[in-house]
Image: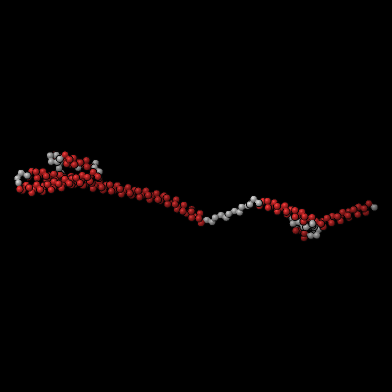
């Protein structure tokens, strides 16, 4: 049976009455897991205490008369504490199950968030790895040959030497390198500079003789 506050007020001490009040429907829902565990332990201790006392009083009541009322009060108090114990244990089980469910839900959400973050990072990591592999596989560009500062000077000196050599060679009657091949094939002797001078001198003498002849 379920005892009411009016029924237990005359039987319980002040501390026991506070324990009874905290087991009522409105008050028990406000207790957390730690508080419920503490009340479970306390109500179990009181129940066991009154049960042992009831057994001792039952043995003593057989030997003497007038102890029936005290024995009955002890029995009722044991029943009250057992009722409180059942209330606290039931509420503690509900609170523990709710807390475990909340922890599982939080763990599932955390795992889902971690998986989502890993899925976002995977393409970027794959692209970075692929880019690094491609960079490693691509051949290095050939090093450009640096033209030294002395190269233009060498080229200038070579041009000057070639020009001087060409002038001296022309004075000696050498055939210049830029003469057209056709002129050389037609009359290679006349194409020489020294022969050109000889032919020009002969033509001049012929003109002088012709002028003298015409003047006579």
Measured as percent of width and height from the top left, residue 136 is found at: 50, 55
Q: Quadrant of residue 14?
A: top left
Residue 24 appears in the picture as rendered = no
Decide which of 29, 141 is in the foreground and name it. 141
Q: Is residue 17 left or right of residue 102?
A: left
Q: Residue extending furthest right?
A: 216
Scheme by which the image is coloured: secondary structure
Q: Position of residue 157 (x, y in %)?
A: 70, 52
Percent across and percent down for residue 179 are 76, 56
Q: Is residue 186 above or below residue 37?
A: below
Would residue 191 be found to the left or right of residue 208 on screen? left
Q: Is residue 156 visible?
A: yes
Q: Looking at the image, which residue is at 13% across and 46% down?
A: 50
Between 213 and 132, the one nearer to me in the picture = 132
Residue furthest to the front:
150
Residue beneath the point at 34% across and 48% down: 109
How many numbered callouts?
0
Which residue corresponds to the image point at 25% horizontal and 47% vertical from the top-left? 96
Which of the image's four quarters has the N terminus?
top left
- Say left or right for 110 vs 30: right
Could you say where residue 69 lies in the image, as x and y percent from the top left?
A: 8, 43
Which residue is painted at 19% across and 45% down in the image? Answer: 42
Out of 8 and 53, give the one closest to the viewer. 53
Residue 145 lies in quadrant: bottom right
């Amino acid at each position: 049976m379920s005892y009411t506050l009016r029924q237990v007020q005359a039987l319980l001490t002040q501390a026991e009455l506070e324990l009874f009040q905290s087991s009522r429907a409105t008050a028990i829902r406000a207790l957390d897991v730690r508080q419920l565990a503490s009340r479970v332990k306390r109500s179990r201790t009181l129940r066991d205490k009154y049960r042992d006392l009831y057994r001792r009083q039952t043995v003593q009541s057989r030997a003497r008369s007038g102890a029936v009322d005290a024995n009955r009060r002890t029995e009722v108090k044991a029943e009250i504490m057992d009722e409180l114990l059942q209330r606290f244990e039931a509420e503690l089980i509900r609170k523990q199950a709710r807390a475990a469910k909340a922890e599982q839900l939080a763990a599932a959400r955390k795992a889902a968030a971690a998986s989502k973050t890993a899925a976002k990072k995977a393409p970027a990591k794959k692209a970075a790895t692929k880019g690094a592999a491609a960079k490693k596989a691509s051949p290095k560009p050939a090093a450009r040959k640096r033209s030294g500062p002395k190269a233009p000077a060498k080229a200038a000196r070579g041009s000057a030497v070639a020009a001087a050599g060409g002038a001296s060679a022309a004075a000696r009657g050498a055939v210049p390198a830029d003469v057209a091949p056709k002129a050389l094939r037609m009359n290679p002797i006349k194409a020489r500079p020294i022969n050109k001078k000889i032919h020009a001198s002969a033509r001049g003498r012929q003109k002088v003789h012709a002028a003298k002849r015409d003047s006579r």
